[in-house]
Structures are given as structure tokens and as C-alpha cells.
Amino acid sequence: MVRDAREIFLEIVAANRKIGGKGIFSVCSANEDVLEACFLQAKEDDSILLIESTSNQVDQYGGYTGMKPADFAGFVYAIAAKVGFPRELILLGGDHLGPNKWQGLPSAEAMIESELLIKEYVKAGFQKIHLDTSMFCADDTGDREKPLNDEVVASRAAVLCRIAEETWKKYCKNSAPPLYVIGSEVPVPGGAQQKEDAIHPTKPEDAARTIDITRQTFINGGLSDAWERVVAVVVQPGVEFGDDRVFHYNRDLARSLSNKITGYGKLVYEAHSTDYQSEENLKALVEDFFCILKVGPWLTFAYREALYALEAIEVEMMGDRSKDLSILKETLDKAMRDDPVHWKKYYAGTEHQQLFKRKYSLSDRSRYYWPDDTVRLAKDRLYKNLRENRIPLSLLSQFMPIQFYKVLNGTLAIDPNELVLDYIRIIAGIYSRACGLSR
């Protein structure tokens, strides 16, 4: 019998708890080229691919991508079919599923929206469900500088878990039941917004309290079977990134947190914001039971880097006064300035500093703008120009040296799309090796 992604995922989790050194990276992106590159990497590795969408990206109303959960699933499957990746080796996950998008509503209303969100994800075949009810709603009391009360968080998570279980039984009974992730990292997803001196790992006692209270709440609520399918807890291992700064993993500081999970049966940790960590640090995270490594902005950052490199080649080839240039960078920045909703509150500073961050911030808020029609047309013009005027090897060496050597070795074609996908795979390859997935 052919093993599917869910079964292999559980084997990876079990192996991580037993010996460490085996993990899985989670691709958190809705960028078509990023997903294609990651599928190509997984195909070469003969591994599964875990792809997750967040509650901001994809929800029952379309999220900022315009896709509902079923739409996103279809989008992912179409890319997989394009590269010949087996559908049964795709594991779809939903990240931060809960009241996140509806924090401005009273808790009762926010939870109604959250229940609809969970239903749509489970109905669409998502099997890894992150129950995240850690955020304050409009009528919640307490100090908002501190985490929401653990009992409140656990009780709301149990409500959403029950909805997921009921939805699975009603619509997906012929498939395996959902797997769950609990807990939430601090700060909010997408990169640090403050100038912290350090990012401190979650206190072991806080992680234990989250697990213990959630477990008891599930059992008291008749969700014992679902609790057996809770596979991971989201914690902060002490890694983060901001506009131009990376907080690197320090396993000595995280050791007590790492050791704590060994007292909890088969559970592992899930680490968010692992972007821009070194391969050595990612490997250490996996060895320390941070089995699931989330990556998103680093992949789209690489995508942007590759396209900027190709535009530099285009300008050198055609001359900076050519009327046929794609002006991709200029077009992207105009799209961001015309609709600043996705970056304005994240990029502080003078006009020049904001311009720099729009181009080069590690937070990569530009990732929201690639679907813009004007940006897509500029990218198409760039590819057309590079295909009609073959890229000289000397320029490829100047701006994309890694791809230059692959072209020399005959393992990569001089085609803009192939060059971009290969560039993204540099990052996917780092994660694959760190997780012990590469062959």
C-alpha cells in the first residue's frame, strides 16, 4: 500500500522524538513560483511537501489572496500536477486558525467566524490544523501586554477542535482525521517589529502549562481522541528576524525548553519565523525537537532577489535608455506606494528609509504585491526580453553566479523561469538538508 503524506509526516514526527535529526519544513507561501520550486525540491528528495496557508492569506471570504481554502487546495494541486509531483505526497496545513482576523469583534462573534474558518479548511482536505486562539478579542479583559488567560485560550481551542472533528465526520469520513497543533509564538507572525536586544525562548514552565491545560480541557470536553492527534506545540525557540537583523538560534539558551518536551509522550515543537537561520542552526533546531520549521518570507525574498538580478542583466544587455525595458523594480514600488496597506505600519523611517525597506527588507512585505496586474505584466516583459536576447554567460556569472556554474555544468538551462526556480531552491535545499530530507 502506498503511504501518503499524513502517514509519512507522522513517521517524521516519531523519528524526531526518538533520535532527533529528522524534521520537516513547512512552506508558508501562496507564491506560485515559490511553490513550484519547493515541489521540484521535494520531487528530487523523494519526500513529502508540507504547505500551509495562514488565516490572513486564505479564509472563508477569500483572505488577501482572494482564495478560500478549497481554492487554495486546487491552486496547490495544479502546481503539483504541472511538475509531476504526486498529490498524495502533499500535506496541507492551516496556520493560526482562530479569531486572529476578527480580534476587533466581541469574542462570541469572533468565534462564530473562527468556526466557519475551521469548517472550510477541514472540508477542503487540510489535515494539519493549527488551533490558535491566543489573541484578545474586543471584549476580553486583562492586561493586553501579557498573554491571554490560558484557560480561555484552551477552552476556545477545544470549541474549534470540536467543530473540526464534526466537520471531518460529516464531510471527510473516508479520509484520515485531522492532526492538530496548539500554542502560539510571540511576537506576531511576519518578523519582529521592535528593536529587541534578544529574543528569549518560551519558558519551559509556560510551554508545560499550555500543554497541560489544553490537554485537560480537551479531555473534560470529550475530545480525548482528538487530543491523541495533537502532534506539536508552537513555541518561541529564540529565533526571529526584522528588517535587517536576524536573531540566531542559541541552543544553550533553549536547552531547558528543548528538554521539557521529552516529558510529553509523542509531542514535538513547531518553530515559526525560522527564516534566515543558518543551515547549521536549522539542523540544531531539528535535533532539539523543533521538528517543524516554518519558512515563508525567506523564500519570497529569494524570489525577489532573483528577479532583481534578472532585471540588472536586462538593463546591461539592452541599455538603461531602452524603451522596451520591463522597469520591474519601479513598477513593483509604484504598486506598493499606490496601496500601502501591506507595508505602511511595518516600515518606519524617512521616505528614503521606507523606499529601501520596500526593496530590501528581510520582512519582504513586497511579497503581497507580485499578483498585481501591472507587476505581472512587468515580469512577463522581463522574461520576454531575456528570451529574445539570450543572456550572456558573463552577465549570468556577474549577477547569478551559482546558476552560472550550473549552466556551465549542463544541469540548468539559460531561461529566466528556470533560473528563478533554481534560485529559490537554494533556500528550499537548505531546509531540506537541515531536516534530513535530501538524498
Image (cartoon, helix red, strand yellow):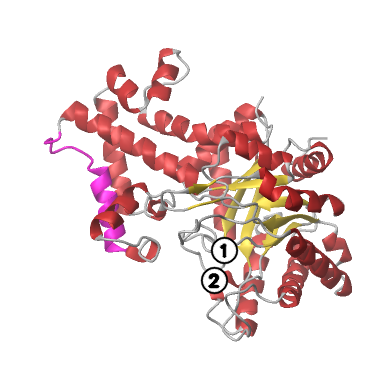
Horizontally, residue 171 falls left or right of residue 109, namely: right
For residue 383, say whether it is visible: no
| Residue shown at 57% from the left, 75% from the top | 145
> In this picture, which residue range is highlighted in magenta?
320-339
Number of other residues with Cα within 10 Å of mark 2, as a class: few under 14, some 14 to 19, many 20 or more: some
Q: Is residue 336 magenta?
A: yes
Toward which corner of the image does residue 433 lie, by quadrant? top right
Toward which corner of the image does residue 400 lie, by quadrant? top left
Residue 20: percent from left, percent from top: 77, 38
Number of other residues with Cα within 10 Å of mark 1, as a class: few under 14, some 14 to 19, many 20 or more: many
For residue 74, say whether it is visible: yes
- For the N terminus, the image quarter is top right
Nearest to N terminus: mark 1 or mark 2: 1
Q: Is residue 126 magenta?
A: no
Residue 129: percent from left, percent from top: 69, 59
Query: What kind of element bears circle 2?
Result: helix
Tell me whether the residue at label 1 lies in contact with that at label 2, contact meaning CB atoms closer than 8 angstroms. yes
> Circle 2 is placed at which residue position?
101
Horizontally, residue 103 falls left or right of residue 152, namely: left
| Residue shown at 29% from the left, 46% from the top | 377
Name which residue type carries label 2: Lys
Q: CA distance from mark 1 to mark 2?
A: 7 Å
Horizontally, residue 166 falls left or right of residue 225, namely: left
Please state which of residues 242 and 336 is positioned toward the viewer in this rendering. Answer: 242
User: Residue 55, labelled with which disc?
Assistant: 1
| Residue shown at 76% from the left, 76% from the top | 151
Name which residue type carries label 1: Ser
Residue 224: percent from left, percent from top: 88, 65
- For the C terminus, the image quarter is top right
